[in-house]
Image (cartoon, coloured by chain):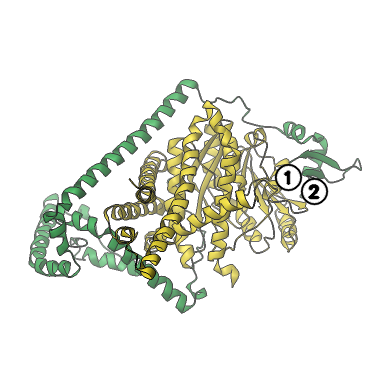
C-alpha cells in the first residue's frame, strides 16, 4: 500500500469508524439514560451559579433575569464582572437592587480572564455544587434539578455537563450548528460517557462539585480552554464526569465565518494544550481509562492534517496535469468527490448519523428539528474543512507562536447576526 | 418537572430571516441544494444496490388512512408548515377491517407500482441506473458490495461488542472496588475554603455578606476589600 493510498484510507475510514462508534454509543446512552424519568430529590443541596462576564452589557440582563424562577428551591447566583469597560457593572448594580436575596456581583479588577474571575467567584460561593455558565446563555428551568440528582446520587461525581442548544438560527451557519451540536457534540459526549471518560465538559453549562474543584486546584489560567483542562484534572484525580442531555442551556453561536473560525481555533488550541499538559497520564497505569480519549484526540488532530494534505496534494497534482500535461494516474483515480465505494458508504453513514442524532435530540426542541436536517449536509463540506484548518492553526499557535502557557484573557466571537445588525 | 426531558416552552429561538438579504437567502438555499445533489451522487451506488435488493421502486409508500386522507398529503402538509386536524382513531376499527384495509391497499399499491414500472425504469435509465446492471450484475460489483456490507456489518458488530464489553467491564470493576477510589470529601465547608485561600474565616464571611464586592487581582493574588480592620487581605495565588 502506497503512502497516498494509506492517507486516502485514513481520511475516509477514520470518520467512518468513529461515526459508527458515536452512533452505537449515542443509541446505548439514549436507551439507558434518556428515556428514564429522573426521580424526585429528597433534599435540595445549595447550588451556586457562577457567571463570569466581560463586556456583556447586551446579554447579561436577560441571562440573570431568566435565572429568577428556576425549578430548584435552593440556589444563588454570582456574576463575576471581570474588568468590563462597558455598562455591564451598571446593569448588574440595577439587577442586584432587584434580586439582592439571591444575586451577588463580584467586580474583579483588572481584567484577568475567565478562569481567574471564576476562581474569585468561587471564594464567595455557598453552594455545595457550582454551575458555571456563560453570560450570554439561557439556562433551562429544570437544569439544576437534573444535575443535582446526579451529584446527590453519586458521591464520586466531580462534574456534569449539560446540553447546549443553539438559540440563534438566522443564517446558514446558525442552522448548520444546530445539526453539529446534536450530531457531533451531543452524540460524541453520549458515546464517551458510555465508554467511561469524557474529553471535555461544555464550558457554557457545566456543574462541578465544589470540593472536587478545590481538590484539583481550581481553574487554570494558562490554557485557552479552562473547561477542557478542568475535565482532565478531575478525571486524573478519579472524579467522575458525566453528561446530562436533559439539562438544557440555550446558547448564542457565532454566525460569521470569522467568528466561527476564531472559536474553532480556540477549541483546537485548547485541546492541544491539554494533551500536552496532561501527557503524564501515560506514565500512570491507573490513568488507563483516559488513554483511549487521549488517543482519539491525537488521531483526530492527525486526521485534520491528513485531510488537508490529501486535498492539497490532489489539487497540486491536478494543477500539474492541467498545466503541464503530466499523466498522473492519481488524478484520474482519486478525485475525492467521485461516488466510489468508500465515499459512498461514508456518505450514507454520515447521513444516518445525522438522522440518529437529530431524532435523539428532537425531544429537546419545541418544534420538529427535522427541518434542520436539510442544512446538515453542509457539515462534511464546510465544517470538516474549517475544523481541519482550525486544528492546523491551533497547533501553529501552540508550538510555533508559543501562545499557549500564558494567562489567557477574554476573546469572544460574535454572538449571532442579530447582535451585529 | 417534566418527566422525559422535553424542553420548556419559554425559549424563543432567534430565527429572523428578515435580517438576511434576499441574495444571501437564495445563495444559502441554492448552495445547500447543490450539497444535497453531491450527497445524492455520492450515495447513488449504494442506494441503487439497496433498491435492487429490497426491490424498492418508489421513494415512500402511502397507505390510505381509514379517514380517507392520504398519508402523503399529511406528510406534505407537515413539511409545508400547516398540519390539518386529522381524525385518525384506529381503535374504532375492528382488527379484521384493519387487516383488510391495510392489505388491500398494499396490494393495490403493488399493482400501481407494477403499472408504473416502465416509467420508473425509464427514469432510472435516464439517471444512469442502467449502469447498475452492467457494473453490479455483469461486472460482479454486487458481490463486492455485498462483501463490503458483510465486512462493514462485521466491523459494526465488533465495535458494538467492544463498546458493550468495555462498559460492562467497567461496571463490574467499580462494583467490585466500591464507588470511590479517591478519599476526598464530597462537601467542602467555608472553613476549608478560607484555609485554602489563606484568609480569615470571619473576614471572608463579612465580605461575603455584601451584595456587590469589589476585589483586585495582583500578581495572581486576590485582594479582598478593606473592612473593619483597615487592611486588605492578599490571598493565595489563583
Left or right of B164 in this view: A396: right
In the rendered view, tell whether residue A308 sits above or below residue B72. above
Name the colour assigned to chain B in the rendering.
Answer: green
Q: Secondary structure at mark 1?
A: helix
Give the label on residue A241, or none: none
In the picture, measured across the screen, residue A117 lies left or right of residue A251, that is right
Label 2 chain ID: B
Name the quadrant containing residue B119: bottom left
* Residue found 37% across the figure and 40% down from its top: A28
Judging depth in this view, the residue of B190 and A42 nearest the camera is B190
Could you tell me residue B161's position as x and y percent? 33, 34
Residue at image x 16%, y 48%?
Answer: B143
**In the rendered view of the protein, which quadrant contains the C terminus of chain A?**
bottom right
Q: Position of residue A86 (x, y in %)?
A: 73, 63
Q: Give the residue number, with chain letter if any, for mark 2.
A: B215
Image marks 1 and 2: residues in contact by CB distance under 8 Å: yes
Where does residue A382 sit, x and y in percent of width and height?
44, 62
Amino acid at each position: 500500500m502506497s503512502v497516498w493510498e494509506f492517507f486516502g484510507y485514513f481520511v475516509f475510514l477514520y470518520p467512518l469508524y468513529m461515526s459508527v462508534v458515536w452512533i452505537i454509543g449515542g443509541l446505548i446512552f439514549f436507551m439507558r439514560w434518556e428515556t428514564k424519568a429522573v426521580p424526585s430529590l429528597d433534599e435540595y443541596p445549595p447550588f451556586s451559579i457562577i457567571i463570569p462576564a466581560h463586556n456583556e452589557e447586551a446579554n447579561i440582563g436577560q441571562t440573570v433575569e431568566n435565572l429568577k424562577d428556576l425549578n430548584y428551591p435552593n440556589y444563588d447566583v454570582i456574576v463575576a464582572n471581570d474588568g468590563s469597560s462597558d455598562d455591564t457593572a451598571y446593569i448588574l448594580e440595577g439587577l442586584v437592587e432587584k434580586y439582592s436575596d439571591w444575586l451577588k456581583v463580584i467586580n474583579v479588577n483588572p481584567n484577568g480572564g475567565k478562569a481567574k474571575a471564576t476562581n474569585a467567584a468561587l471564594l464567595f460561593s455557598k453552594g455545595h455544587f457550582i454551575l458555571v455558565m456563560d453570560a450570554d446563555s439561557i439556562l433551562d428551568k429544570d437544569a439544576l434539578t437534573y444535575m443535582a440528582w446526579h451529584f446527590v446520587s453519586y458521591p464520586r461525581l466531580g462534574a456534569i455537563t449539560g446540553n447546549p442548544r443553539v438559540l440563534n438560527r438566522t443564517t446558514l451557519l446558525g442552522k448548520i450548528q444546530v445539526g453539529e451540536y446534536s450530531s457531533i457534540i451531543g452524540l460524541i459526549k453520549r458515546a464517551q460517557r458510555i465508554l467511561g471518560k469524557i474529553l471535555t465538559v461544555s464550558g457554557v453549562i457545566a456543574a462541578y462539585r465544589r470540593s472536587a474543584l478545590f481538590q484539583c486546584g481550581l481553574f487554570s489560567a494558562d490554557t485557552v480552554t479552562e473547561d477542557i483542562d478542568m475535565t482532565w484534572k478531575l478525571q486524573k484525580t478519579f472524579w467522575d464526569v458525566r453528561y446530562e442531555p436533559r439539562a438544557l442551556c440555550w446558547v448564542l453561536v457565532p454566525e460569521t465565518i470569522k467568528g466561527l473560525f476564531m472559536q474553532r481555533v480556540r477549541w483546537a488550541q485548547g485541546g492541544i494544550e491539554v494533551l500536552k499538559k496532561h501527557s503524564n497520564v501515560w506514565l500512570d497505569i491507573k490513568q488507563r481509562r483516559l488513554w483511549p480519549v487521549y488517543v482519539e484526540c491525537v488521531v483526530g488532530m492527525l486526521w485534520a492534517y491528513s485531510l488537508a494534505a490529501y486535498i492539497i496534494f490532489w489539487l497540486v497534482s491536478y494543477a500539474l496535469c492541467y498545466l503541464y500535461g503530466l499523466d498522473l494516474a492519481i488524478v484520474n483515480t482519486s478525485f475525492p468527490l467521485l461516488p466510489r465505494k468508500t465515499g459512498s458508504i461514508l456518505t450514507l453513514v454520515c447521513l444516518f448519523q445525522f438522522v440518529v442524532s437529530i431524532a435523539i435530540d428532537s425531544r429537546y426542541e419545541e418544534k420538529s428539528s427535522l427541518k434542520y436536517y436539510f442544512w446538515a449536509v453542509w457539515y462534511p463540506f464546510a465544517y470538516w474543512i474549517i475544523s481541519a484548518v482550525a486544528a492546523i492553526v491551533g497547533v501553529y499557535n501552540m508550538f510555533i507562536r508559543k501562545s499557549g502557557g500564558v494567562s489567557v484573557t477574554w476573546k469572544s466571537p460574535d454572538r449571532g447576526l442579530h447582535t451585529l445588525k | 418537572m417534566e418527566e422525559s426531558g422535553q424542553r420548556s416552552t419559554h425559549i424563543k429561538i432567534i430565527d429572523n430571516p428578515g435580517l438576511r438579504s434576499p441574495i444571501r437567502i437564495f445563495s444559502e438555499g441554492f448552495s445547500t441544494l447543490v450539497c444535497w445533489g453531491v450527497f445524492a451522487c455520492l450515495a447513488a451506488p449504494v442506494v441503487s444496490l439497496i433498491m435492487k435488493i429490497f426491490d424498492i421502486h418508489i421513494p415512500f409508500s402511502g397507505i390510505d388512512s381509514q379517514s380517507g386522507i392520504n398519508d402523503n398529503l399529511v406528510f406534505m402538509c407537515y413539511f409545508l408548515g400547516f398540519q390539518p386536524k386529522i381524525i385518525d382513531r384506529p381503535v374504532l376499527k375492528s382488527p379484521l377491517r384493519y387487516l383488510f384495509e391495510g392489505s388491500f391497499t398494499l396490494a393495490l399499491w403493488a399493482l400501481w407500482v407494477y403499472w408504473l414500472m416502465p416509467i420508473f425504469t425509464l427514469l432510472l435509465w435516464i439517471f444512469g441506473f442502467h449502469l447498475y446492471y452492467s457494473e453490479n450484475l455483469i461486472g460482479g460489483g454486487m458481490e463486492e458490495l455485498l462483501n463490503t456490507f458483510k465486512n462493514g456489518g462485521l466491523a459494526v458488530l465488533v465495535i458494538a461488542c467492544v463498546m458493550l464489553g468495555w462498559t460492562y467491564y467497567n461496571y463490574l470493576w467499580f462494583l467490585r472496588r466500591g464507588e470511590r477510589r479517591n478519599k476526598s470529601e464530597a462537601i467542602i465547608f467555608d472553613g476549608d475554603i478560607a484555609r485554602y485561600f489563606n484568609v480569615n474565616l470571619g473576614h471572608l464571611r463579612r465580605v461575603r455578606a455584601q451584595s456587590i464586592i469589589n476585589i483586585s487581582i495582583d500578581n495572581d493574588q486576590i485582594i479582598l476589600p478593606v473592612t473593619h480592620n483597615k487592611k486588605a487581605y492578599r490571598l493565595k495565588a489563583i
